[in-house]
Every structure is written in C-alpha cells, then in structure tokens.
Amino acid sequence: MVIKKVLFMASVYKPNVGGVETCIANLARFYQKMGIKTAVLTKKFPFDLPEFETVDGVSILRISRPQQLGDFINVFKIINKYKQTISGNIIHLIGIRRPMPLIGLFLSRLWQVPFIVSFAGGDLPNSDDPETIKLWQDGLTTVPKAVTQADCHIAFSNDLICLARKAIPTLNHINLIFAGVDLNRIKKSPKHKSLFPYIFIARRLTPDKGVDILIQAFSKISVKYPPLRLIIAGSGEGKDNLINLTKKLNLLNRVQFLGELTSDKVFEYMKGAIAHVCPSRAEGGGVVNLEAQAASCLSIGSNVGGIPEYIKDKKTGFIFESQNINELTGLLELAINQPDIRKKIIANASANIKNFDWKYIAQQHLKIYTKTITSTPSKTITSWNSLTKKLLVSLRLNDSRSNTPATL
C-alpha cells in the first residue's frame, strides 16, 4: 500500500525546540519531497498558540491536555473537526508522555489505521533522572497499556529499548532506528567567528543534562588557558543555578549564556568550537552528538544512555565517565593541546556521519510504515480502566451493534 499521508503526534511541537520536534520536522520535510503529506497533532503549549496553523507545509493541530472523560470527548470532537486536513493512513507518535498515547490509540482505531510508537529520551523511567520517574508515575494509569496496544514500536537507541522493556515487560519486538541529521543544511551553515577560542554546549538547562559538570571541568582549565571561553546555548529551569555556579567559581567573565538558539545558529557555533560537550546524567541518545560530528566539531559525551551509540569512543569522538569531572577535564585539555588527534577524530566522524543523513533515516521509517500497514489487521481496543471503558462507549468503538464508530 502506498503511504499518502502521515499524522505525527508529539507532546509538544514548534515553536518548541528539542529532539522530538527536530525529528518530526526533518521526517516531514523529506516526506514532502517524496509527495507524502504530513500533519502534526500536539498539545497547545505555550497556551497562547493558535489551535490550528500550517508551518512549512505541515498542518499543525494543537489540543488542550484532557483530564476527565468529558475533556477527552471534547478533544476527539476537535480532532474530528479537522479530520479532512490532518488524517493520514498512518499515525506515528514520537515520545510517550501523557495523554498522547491514549489519544493516538483511540484515534487509530476510529480511523482504522495503524498506530506506531517511537520511544524518545526522557519519557521512560530512568533511575539516573528522577524527573522521568515523576513523569512516568503521572501517566501510569494510561500510558503503558496504550503503548502496549500500538501496532509497531521504534526506539532511537538500544538503551531506550532496554528502558522500554524494563518499564513495559509485555512489549513485543522494538525496531531500532537512530536519530538523523540534515547533512546538507549543516554543511551550508557558516562558521562562527570569535575573538576567543571556546568550548560549546547546546543543551536544555536542566539537571539531567549535566551542564554544571562541564562548568566545573572548565573551571579547572580556565587558569591554564586565559583566552578560552565556555559558551552555553539553551534554556530551562536550571539556568539560575548554573549562573550562580559560575559566580561561585569566579567565571562570570569566561562563561557566556546565549539562551535558546535556532538550529542553524547552533551549527554555526559548533563549527567554530574546539569541542562540543554532552555531559548528561541521563540521555536517550542525543542527536546533538551527531550534529556536532556533522559540523566537523569534536564531540565529547558522557557514558550514559544511548550516547555511546552515537559517539564511538576514540573513533568518532570521546566518551567520559558520567559526572567524572577530572576525566572530562583531561579530554578538554587533549582537545586543546593535541590538534592532530582532534583532527583525526573529526575526520573519522565526518566519514561515518553520512550513515545518519535524514534521507536514509526517513527511508527506514517509511519501510516500517509500509510493512505495518500491509501486515496489521483491523484491531479493537482492550480497555483497562473506567476511563477507557467509558471512552469506548462514547466513541462507539468495539460496538458489535455498529460497524461505524461515532461521528462526534
């Protein structure tokens, strides 16, 4: 069967910036080039965003987060209002934060199309990141059962596959498809020109991303290399704590916080940097590590999660033990003092990164879509709590008296 349109689902989307948003935007762009239409169903955040708009040829429908049965019914009424515009012959949810898995499952059965779920970093409970455990508990009554009933599962790293199986032991086969990079776009980005040499990091400013670890490592080498700067791009609730840390370490004139940058600006800063560092305490994979390699920037990352799957230690970058400030300090000094080794690693990474171009990654997803459509029979939903039982009745799903689901 020919794929004509894909409906992507995500907890948040543009103008928000992150790995999931980047993934969807790149998949949508390549599919549009192939004549495949795309749409996105997401939550309305920030709350002043329009309910519906079209961005870069992608139709985007934003819904408020439902809590009770009446809220869910209202959500499906809104979706039905835009059905002709957003419906596809495949529904692909990327990231499993509540309430999107439940909505995706019910929507797929209403439209009688396959439901595919991709596991992304930060959505599965991880002992190294307490925030993920809180999120998982928040969606425990709906997320696992909805995800289990999806027709196909994908993960961005083997580490995420392990986390998914630990959280939901009943899962069947999980396909591994790595995240990708837009090589052509990165190649076209100019190199940032700076009066000073600098280390660069582009991360959310939250504890799990470990920016404080890099700041402490930088403080250890700052006296040896007076011209060196640390440039930090990103936003998040941990920014004030990080600024206070730079004050405590007397680094205010050596560390620069740029705030949120566009992807193109991130690529520019990567191209001009001595190295990009991903010092996460927890990470599903970290596409930023691939972006750095594509920008011919030395990529240094911690040994947690899927990072070692995206950086091959001493081949396409360097890996250090998570939270080991001394080991990271040593790698920063190596990057500064041994340019021949740095150039060799960058050359290896530049050759290897071609395998992660989005045009190849998009084709891998497309093969999964086609296989799922041709091999998945029409299915019903197995309810698991009061909410899902009542929602099945309201939407007239699984109703033996009618072959036609309710039109809301």
Image (cartoon, grey):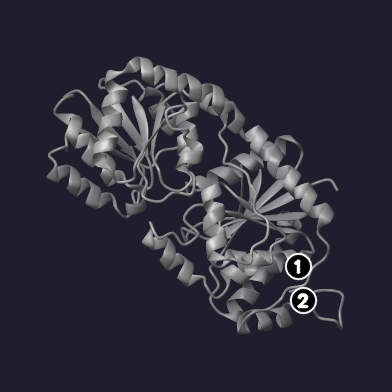
Residue 55: percent from left, percent from top: 60, 45
Amino acid identity at mark 1: Arg
Circle 1 sits in a helix, a strand or a loop, which is it? Answer: helix
Image vertical order of residue 233 relative to residue 133, above or below: above
Image vertical order of residue 257 relative to residue 43, above or below: above
Which residue sits at x=55%, y=22%? Answer: 351
* Apparent side of residue 130 relative to residue 44 in the rendered image (left or right): left
Amino acid identity at mark 2: Leu
Residue 109 is marked as 1
10 Å crowding of disc 2: few (<14), some (14-19), many (20+)? many
Residue 314: percent from left, percent from top: 42, 28
Q: Are marks 1 and 2 in contact (CB under 8 Å)?
A: yes
Image vertical order of residue 43 relative to residue 22, above or below: below
Which residue does the numbered mark 2 point to in the structure image?
Answer: 397
Circle 2 sits in a helix, a strand or a loop, which is it? Answer: loop
Of residues 21 and 154, the one drawn nearer to the viewer in this rendering: 154
Name which quarter of the figure residue 85 lies in: bottom right
Of residues 273 and 12, the one drawn nearer to the viewer in this rendering: 273
Residue 188: percent from left, percent from top: 52, 22
- On the question of residue 307 being in view, the answer is yes
Residue 222 is marked as none
How many marks do you count on the picture?
A: 2
Residue 109: percent from left, percent from top: 75, 67
